[in-house]
Image (cartoon, coloured by chain):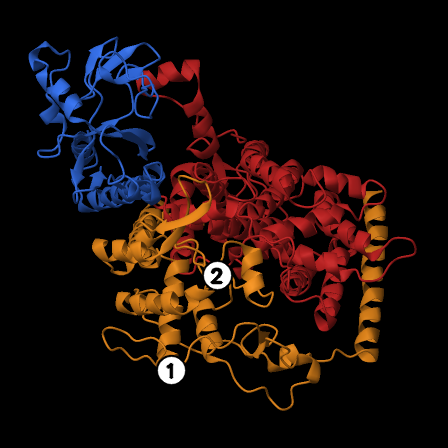
Chain colours: A blue, B orange, C red
């Protein structure tokens, strides 16, 4: 558009150097105003992003040495509950014998754990239906029909691999990015 | 009416102020102000220069690390640094593992998971540096009723802060012979002319050779005082280097902008007398 | 707008025509700051400061809104939330320093704007309403600035709030209850901090509203000018755009250079170190000083040291301090000289430059110095002059002064040639 105007103006006012130079200065001054305004907008927009202290907590390290077989803990990661569960051999066997193809969200236990550490199930404690916190991590809580987790809000049942088996939830409990830094130290995030 | 009222009010205001001025003069003659010992003996901070001074100055991370070591080994016994988290130490050049190790070596307050009693645990990078005392009462009890202030913002909380900290640390000296009796340091106080009321509860905290630096940097009193002042400048103003860099970019941009608008203005006004 | 030959807004593009018939905001802008506003051609650079004040307010509103997204108005959290902004929020240090120094720059600009008005007689008929609204804006700014300074909850915040609200307790009978009502308690505390935050957020928008009235009132008679001679012919004026938009652009650039230089290279120069110490009701700073823009008024407050009959000195000081601003409301009726511009008033000019300006500078200096001996004396003499200047000297000189001959028109003043009367 600007170039169209330029042509029109040049032909109208005769192609004098002075005219073009004058226009150039006005355009340059206006462009600088625009660039300056945009540069000022950057921090105004950027300030709403996660601040340094929040980002610093984006990954946490959890010592799992004290979780005995069959127990689970709840911890907080990115302001959300995380369940870390030390599966018993029976629970592992339970989870492994299910035919993956028959599941609503087909995943095997191995897909959801680290090789050699299949007994450590790390999942978000957020039901994939509407975001309630399922029961089953703390001792004495209902674990649902499949021995894993049970969401009391709308009755979703998760098995010992945290996979959805019954109820309205569409997906398995989310496994966050995690890694073993040592035999007992898990880094989440 | 307005002017008559104003005249009367003005006459009263100005008149009474001049009467008050007369009283002030009378008092200045009859009770001349005596220079207090605080005023006479107090000294302004020494002239000291840092690499981060001036519009181009940048923090010297090696110096900040030495300053941190002085803080950790000496100051931290009494002074907190409660705006600083271990993770912030990455900004002065420690790598991730070093930060983790420093944090782990510190004990931060926590709660015993079984009993609910106050307890401690090894720190992690996101923890704030722990305070040496649980609360103000504990701090005062341990320090002859004096409260060691938090140092995070100390260099911004005093006029000419970095020089003030340096001068205070190196300013302990013998009590001058002509210091009036009531200004002499009492029990548990120490004479330091750089401190506002001359007598400070903190004993001289640093002495030559007290801290040893891994790289063999000088560890006399003055060098260490300078290093820790630089470190405390960083704790108070961690974004200084970034601030100055942004400032230069903004200034250069604005100078060009102003030049262009000035040319544009001249073009527009050409031929208009005004 | 106010003159017969002003350009009329004629939208070319069909969309703009469509808009003009339904919600004529472009027409409003054109008539306010565009080619439709005919402005005297002889403005000097002091006439830039009105627009700059508007820019300064917008900087404060924009940075303030984003800072409020991170600020925590609790007495335990306020100080740390400001440090959180300085350390953790993306670009937070810039936003906070810009807001903090932006307040000072707003006052610098407004003070120059006020002095320009005082010197060129901008308060005189037919522009009294512009002046009255301007003084109102100034009062609102002072209230907003004070409450903003309390928000970081540092030592000066707390003790400033203590001292300023203490003014009200000087009022007989209702003073102490009034003070408690303002604070919501017996001393500055949570209730005061929360309401100051609320009002500090609200008042800038009130200021914005009064500014719109201020500009509206200005556009009825049209702008004044350095000669004080009214606009008579088309030759006397130029359309605001592009002439004064380009000139304001240059002024804006220079202003921003100064603002950026302070904000990025000496951000704490205009602040007080004690405000980096968290508020402590048990320990008073050695010298409580307000922000620099209140120093002259603070000096007037402290200049009254002697009781007058049954009126205590403290009350006199408070009355005088408020009175020193309130008298500005009466200025259009105190200075009755028909000549507006100080350029053509030799006597006025002398009192302005050698009386008023030095007295305010001295008051400002005394306001930051300790209230003792020579500084009290200086502030007493300067304050006496300040009141005398407005209440006694101005009314008298406007009667006795022999003014210089005025040019017949702005054009004559500019070109130096008399304009031939066109029959």
| Vertical position of residue C124 compared to residue A173: above or below | below
Q: Which residue occupies 73% across, 37% down?
A: C181
> Closer to the observer: label 2 or label 1?
1
Q: Is residue C63 left or right of residue C294?
A: left
Q: Quadrant of residue A103?
A: top left
Q: Is residue B224 left or right of residue C353?
A: left
- Viewer-proximal residue, B243 or B214? B214
Residue B110 place in picture, x, y as percent: 41, 46
* Residue wearing tag 1: B208
Q: Is residue B102 visible?
A: yes
Mark sitting on residue A168: none
Q: Secondary structure at mark 2?
A: loop
Q: Secondary structure at mark 1?
A: loop
Q: Quadrant of residue C258?
A: bottom left
| Vertical position of residue B213 compared to residue C30: above or below | below
Mark sitting on residue C269: 2
- Viewer-proximal residue, A155 or B30? A155
């Amino acid at each position: 558009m600007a170039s169209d105007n330029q042509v029109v103006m040049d032909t109208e006012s005769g192609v004098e150097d002075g005219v073009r130079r004058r226009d150039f200065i006005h355009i340059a001054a206006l462009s600088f105003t625009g660039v300056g305004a945009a540069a000022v907008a950057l921090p105004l927009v950027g300030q709403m992003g996660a601040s340094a202290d929040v980002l610093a907590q984006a990954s946490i390290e959890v010592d799992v040495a004290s979780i005995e077989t069959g127990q689970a803990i709840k911890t907080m990661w990115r302001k959300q509950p995380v369940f870390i569960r030390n599966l018993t051999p029976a629970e592992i066997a339970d989870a492994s014998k299910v035919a993956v193809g028959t599941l609503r969200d087909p995943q095997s236990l191995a897909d959801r754990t680290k090789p050699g550490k299949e007994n450590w199930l790390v999942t978000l404690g957020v039901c994939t239906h509407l975001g309630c916190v399922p029961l089953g991590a703390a001792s004495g809580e209902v674990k649902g029909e499949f021995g894993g987790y049970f969401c009391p809000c709308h009755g979703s049942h998760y098995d010992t691999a945290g996979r959805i088996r019954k109820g309205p939830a569409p997906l398995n409990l989310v496994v966050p990015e995690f890694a073993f830094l040592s035999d007992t130290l898990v880094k989440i995030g | 009416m307005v002017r008559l009222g104003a005249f009367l009010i003005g006459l009263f205001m100005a008149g009474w102020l001049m009467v008050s001025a007369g009283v002030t003069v009378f008092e200045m003659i009859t009770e001349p102000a005596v220079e207090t010992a605080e005023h006479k003996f107090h000294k302004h901070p020494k002239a000291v220069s840092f690499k981060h001074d001036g519009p181009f100055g940048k923090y010297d991370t090696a110096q900040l690390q030495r300053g941190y070591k002085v803080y950790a080994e000496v100051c931290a016994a009494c002074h907190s640094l409660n705006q600083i988290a271990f993770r912030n130490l990455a900004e002065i050049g420690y790598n991730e593992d070093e930060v983790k190790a420093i944090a782990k070596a510190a004990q931060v307050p926590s709660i015993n998971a079984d009993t609910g009693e106050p307890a401690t645990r090894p720190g992690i990078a996101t923890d704030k540096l722990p305070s040496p005392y649980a609360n103000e009462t504990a701090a005062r009890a341990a320090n002859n009723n004096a409260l060691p202030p938090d140092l995070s913002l100390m260099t911004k909380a005093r006029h000419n802060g970095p020089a003030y900290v340096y001068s205070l640390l190196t300013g302990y000296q013998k009590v001058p012979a002509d210091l009036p009796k009531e200004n002499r340091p009492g029990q548990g106080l120490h004479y330091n002319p750089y401190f506002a009321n001359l007598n400070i509860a903190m004993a001289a905290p640093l002495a030559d050779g007290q801290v040893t630096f891994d790289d063999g940097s000088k560890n006399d009193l003055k060098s260490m005082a300078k290093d820790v002042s630089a470190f405390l400048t960083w704790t108070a103003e961690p974004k200084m280097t970034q601030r100055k860099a942004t400032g230069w970019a903004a200034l250069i941009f604005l100078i060009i902008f102003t030049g262009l608008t000035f040319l544009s203005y001249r073009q527009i006004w050409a031929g208009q007398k005004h | 707008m106010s003159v017969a030959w002003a350009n009329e807004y004629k939208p070319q593009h069909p969309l703009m025509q469509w808009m003009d018939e339904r919600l004529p905001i472009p027409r409003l802008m054109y008539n306010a700051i565009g080619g439709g506003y005919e402005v005297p051609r002889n403005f000097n650079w002091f006439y830039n400061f009105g627009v700059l004040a508007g820019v300064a307010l917008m900087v404060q509103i924009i940075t303030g809104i984003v800072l409020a997204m991170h600020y925590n108005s609790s007495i335990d959290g306020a100080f740390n939330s400001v440090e959180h902004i300085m350390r953790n929020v993306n670009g937070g240090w810039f936003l906070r320093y810009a807001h903090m120094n932006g307040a000072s720059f707003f006052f610098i600009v407004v003070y120059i704007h006020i002095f320009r008005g005082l010197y060129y007689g901008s308060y005189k008929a037919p522009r009294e309403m512009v002046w009255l609204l301007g003084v109102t804006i100034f009062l609102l700014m002072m209230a907003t600035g004070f409450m903003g300074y309390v928000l970081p909850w540092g030592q000066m915040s707390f003790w400033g709030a203590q001292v300023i609200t203490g003014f009200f307790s000087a009022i007989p009978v209702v003073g102490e209850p009034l003070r408690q009502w303002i604070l919501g308690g017996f001393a500055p505390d949570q209730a005061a901090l929360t309401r100051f935050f609320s009002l500090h957020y609200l008042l800038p928008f009130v200021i914005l509203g009064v500014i719109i009235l201020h500009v509206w009132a200005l556009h009825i008679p049209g702008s004044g000018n350095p000669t004080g001679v009214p606009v008579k012919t088309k030759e006397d004026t130029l359309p605001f755009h592009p002439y004064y938009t380009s000139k304001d652009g240059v002024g804006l650039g220079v202003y921003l250079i100064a603002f950026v230089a302070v904000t990025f290279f000496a951000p704490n120069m205009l602040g007080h170190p004690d405000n980096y110490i968290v508020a402590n009701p048990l320990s008073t700073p050695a010298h409580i000083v307000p922000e620099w823009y209140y120093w002259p008024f603070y000096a007037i407050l402290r200049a009254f040291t002697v009781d007058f009959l049954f009126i205590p000195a403290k009350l006199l000081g408070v009355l005088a301090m408020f009175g020193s601003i309130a008298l500005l409301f009466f200025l259009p009726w105190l200075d009755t000289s028909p000549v507006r511009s100080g350029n053509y008033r030799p006597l006025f000019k002398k009192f302005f430059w050698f009386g008023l300006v030095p007295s305010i500078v001295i008051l400002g200096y005394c306001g930051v110095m300790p209230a003792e001996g020579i500084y009290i004396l200086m502030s007493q003499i300067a304050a006496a002059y300040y009141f005398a200047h407005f209440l006694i000297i101005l009314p008298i000189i406007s009667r006795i002064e022999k003014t210089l001959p005025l040019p017949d028109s702005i054009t004559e003043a500019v070109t130096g040639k008399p304009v031939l009367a066109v029959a």
